[in-house]
Image (cartoon, coloured by chain):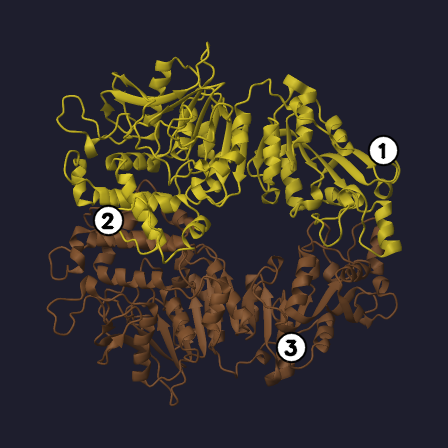
Chain colours: A brown, B yellow
Amino acid sequence: MSTDDIRTDAPLVHAQTVVFDEPLALELGGELPEVRCCFETWGTLNADASNAILVCHAISGDSHAARHDPEDLPGWWDGLIGPGLPIDTDRFFVVCPNVLGGCRGSTGPGDVPAGASQPYGADFPRITIGDMVEAQRRLAEHLGIRKWRAIVGGSLGGHQALQWVSRYPDAAQTCVAIATSPRLTSQALGFDVIARNAIQTDPHFADGQYYGRDKRPDTGLAIARMLGHITYLSVAAMEAKFDPDRHDPRRIASQMASQFEQRFSVGSYLAHQGQKFTTRFDANSYVTLSLAMDLFDLGGTRLKLMETFDECTCDFLLVGFSSDWLFPPSQSREIVNALTALDKRVTYAEITTDAGHDAFLIDRDMATYGPLVRERLSMPSDSPESTPVHLTLAEESILDLIEPGNSVLDLGCGQGELLAAIAIRDGRASGRLMGVEVAQENILATAVRGIDVIDYDLNAGLPAFIDDQFDVVVLNATLQAVENVVELLDEMLRVGKRAIISFPNFAYRRLRDDYVVRGRSPRAPGEFDYAWHNTPNRRFPTIADVHDLLHDMGVTIDREIYWDMIDSKNVAIEGDPNLNADTAVLEIHR
Amino acid sequence: MSTDDIRTDAPLVHAQTVVFDEPLALELGGELPEVRCCFETWGTLNADASNAILVCHAISGDSHAARHDPEDLPGWWDGLIGPGLPIDTDRFFVVCPNVLGGCRGSTGPGDVPAGASQPYGADFPRITIGDMVEAQRRLAEHLGIRKWRAIVGGSLGGHQALQWVSRYPDAAQTCVAIATSPRLTSQALGFDVIARNAIQTDPHFADGQYYGRDKRPDTGLAIARMLGHITYLSVAAMEAKFDPDRHDPRRIASQMASQFEQRFSVGSYLAHQGQKFTTRFDANSYVTLSLAMDLFDLGGTRLKLMETFDECTCDFLLVGFSSDWLFPPSQSREIVNALTALDKRVTYAEITTDAGHDAFLIDRDMATYGPLVRERLSMPSDSPESTPVHLTLAEESILDLIEPGNSVLDLGCGQGELLAAIAIRDGRASGRLMGVEVAQENILATAVRGIDVIDYDLNAGLPAFIDDQFDVVVLNATLQAVENVVELLDEMLRVGKRAIISFPNFAYRRLRDDYVVRGRSPRAPGEFDYAWHNTPNRRFPTIADVHDLLHDMGVTIDREIYWDMIDSKNVAIEGDPNLNADTAVLEIHR
């Protein structure tokens, strides 16, 4: 399933419709005299209405997010929503409304306003993502839902989820925003402008009053859709899809005589997708929804984004996709950086994929990020204890140095074992615990333990965090793999009141012997067990080296713990650790 | 100057026109009964017609590549063409023709065919880049030019340059292809298809017979141009250009009442650029030229590209731009990889810039790549001797190991000193000399010595080269910075009949003392003079380590040279080099 195949032209046999008579005042002025909302639900609302999840669709989606039964037509998020799936309909009551301004059952430009003789057309008022949220609030009230267990959406759906919690900080327990952004890039905005220009200059657009006429602005709408399709795919995905038969286009089954060029396989595909779209979507709705996206702006600076999310009480999951150039991962990071600076609970993963923006709808990528969604929706009973935790001796030393209730940032947190051990030890008295990692499998492993973790390259410093944000910042067995050592230590001591670093000591007796006796690069069990030519380490500090550097940096060492794990089998070292210890743990502050 | 500002609507006061009566048979069938060519020239053709340079323009360019005098209107490559500039009009006779199928003086769809009553319009035959080259050949013959000193072009102009030399292998001494590709990506092709769809479905397109009518397909052409503009800019460039006043569009001086949306600053810009384009460009020409680009296909595999360029006798310069996503640098590399495998003379630089595809027209980027063009066009008298060469002792050892006339590939060639020293020593008897580098300033420094160099990350192996291509492959003082040591050594021994490696010995006596006596990471003058926490080195081999590894890899060491440059001041070491030498030079083969 990808955006190619989303079929929303089928009858919405499971949809319900509700009409709210109260006029809706719009953010940019004007009002809608009434609001009709078409929606579908899955699962059962529980007695205290605490298990409701709002799912928000993207620009060309609709309320049919998932199959209701095996015979049902496919939905656009079948891999995510259903019995036993990450958004588990055995457990949750899932609600997906067609968006305000759409053309699949909810109030939109194709409606005839009360007392009028023709539909709104281009006179449909300019709406915002905020107005969409207001319409959804009425639906929530109607369904008896005071607080959403979660609001979940991708792309424009992600915009809605973010708008909900920024406007109503207590509206949800969890906000899941996938392949989305605080606002569009200028590039994406430019593409939208061109798409609207194509629609609105189509002579059959007729100022939006084409309803009931012979001709509709199908040409402009098809061109808009073609443009959208290119932006949903990555350059690599397009190469794989169209290059093998570039000059010899496949015949597409439903292929009709077309006014559009079908010379190249990509042309034939675009013609097909463009024309198909005109049979199921309304041009005025496309203009309305794309403009709402373009006007969406939670903030262009971190400060502005921090104001936007300041009062939110929910936790967050953000997911970006490496090859998404329409909503690039850097835009998800902007939101993440604001949320971390606000000390909100947030997990962020950047999924490596060639699928581009479309990835949020693609089964394979859904299988990767689905477990993150599942974890964010898990109950408190699904606690970190469920996954076994094994600490190294150095990690146990670090654990001992962390007082109960301390807030802890673990840089290069691996699979989150240390943070999970703190969570288990401190239980409900735990301080804020957060990991930073760069390897996708580690991020996923940490997140599914229920530990917040963000995808981040330590070599870029710690711009996501503010001064003195954590009681303790940990860098465990990672110093030797860092490129910018001094910069990172500075950043740790800026972000943490204290820092704890552990590292292998390359002046350990046995390693010195390798040089002197064997004349070879040192090698020993554990962290030292790599050949010179393929070690992932790039720094080979001794304890004396690190002492020298910390002294030069004006950093105070508060506590020092040294271990000989190799030769003496886990013995604490008191005398001449630079010779006798293979591992150092230092607690430092500035 | 960028594509925004190219103004080609001015009268072509310096243009000449020549008409060739002989019919031109077209590559895809059909013919043009005559070919008119509009062109401009700069400088003077010398007596043996050996100083002529053909400059080929991009899709919306024309013959006015540069000012003819200070009062003249700006040209689109003023930073590159002129007295004393890289394409030096004091030295060269420069010719820039308007392309076949264009609308600025050469034969195109706006012409009325002999005996007809209306212009070709959409009946203008489908032409190819090859047909453009054929028209230019007639011009060359007309001007008395049997062989071009160089053919130079960017984007579509680069396609023409590449087509010239692949079809006529002896047509030029040098081919300079900038921001170009062997064929379009499927993504770029998709954008072109949409642009043509916008033009051809404009009701005023009238099957291309809009000439002389009240209305022309200006809407479709403007939309095509808007789309083009986005693809010429990078996402970062657009952010910088449009974000500061995103919601508050500047008033553009020439702004006219527009049918296009001008709500956002990017929209106002696109509306302006789109409309401006309709006043100076013909829609049928746009369709004709973009289709010729889309049909252009020198090969989708290296083997096919090797067939394409197999017989070329020219040397090549290719330049890509890091943020160009329309003609991404990876596409220039495809050509480079084929040329290197064919052992053609080629230099390739990827210029780091935010300017996107437009970079080839932007003064700042022109100032960066201009010297590469200047060097490729230099005379044999501008020899490497002109730049002083200083060799290290290890480099002198390597030089001694290379026999006169050997072909040499130097990996991580730095500023090209070793290769320049070989060129000076061997003079006309030099074998093929080539460098590989990743640092832009080193690539530029090597290239301006007249040494071929390609921009390449050694960690990706040496896929550009074929088995046994060079007599000697050198890795000088670079082993310690390589991530994939074994893979690279394997690749060197595949590509070279022999390899020579030099590296610092981290078991050198004084370094061992650092560990044993001082308990600190070793440090010494030269290659060892880095602190543990910020060294660019990531491997710390000893001579014994390298011997062990080569033995394990089944590699034979033919010659070994060891130096103590630090303590004994440049003394060759005979006994126990692993202890006494700070530098090793090994000649190896498999």
Residue A265 can be seen, yes or no: no
Residue B214 can be seen, yes or no: yes
Mark 1, Cα crowd under 10 Å, few <14 / some 14-19 / many 20+, is some
Helix, strand or loop under label 3 = helix
Residue tagged by mark 1? Answer: B572
Marked residue nearer the N-terminal end (1 or 2):
2
Marks 3 and 1 on same chain: no
Residue A216 image position (x, y, % from top left): 16, 56
Residue A540 image position (x, y, % from top left): 75, 56
Amino acid under label 1? Ala
Find the distance from the CA under tag 3 to the CA under tag 1: 57 Å
Residue B34 image position (x, y, % from top left): 24, 20
Residue at x 37% of width, y 47% of height: B230
Q: Is residue A30 left or right of residue B297?
A: left
Residue tagged by mark 2? Answer: B257
Q: Nearer the viewer, residue A365 or B466?
A: A365
Compared with A7, B255 (above or below) is above
Residue tagged by mark 3? Answer: A421
Q: Is residue A218 left or right of residue A48?
A: left
**The C terminus of chain A, quarter of image:** bottom right
Amino acid under label 3? Ala
Compared with B40, A343 (above or below) is below
Compared with B375, A30 (above or below) is below
Classify residue B68 by image quadrant. Answer: top left
Amino acid under label 2? Ala
Which of labels 1 and 2 is toward the front?
2
Q: Residue furthest bottom?
A: A47
Residue A89 image position (x, y, % from top left): 38, 78
Mark 3, Cα crowd under 10 Å, few <14 / some 14-19 / many 20+, is many
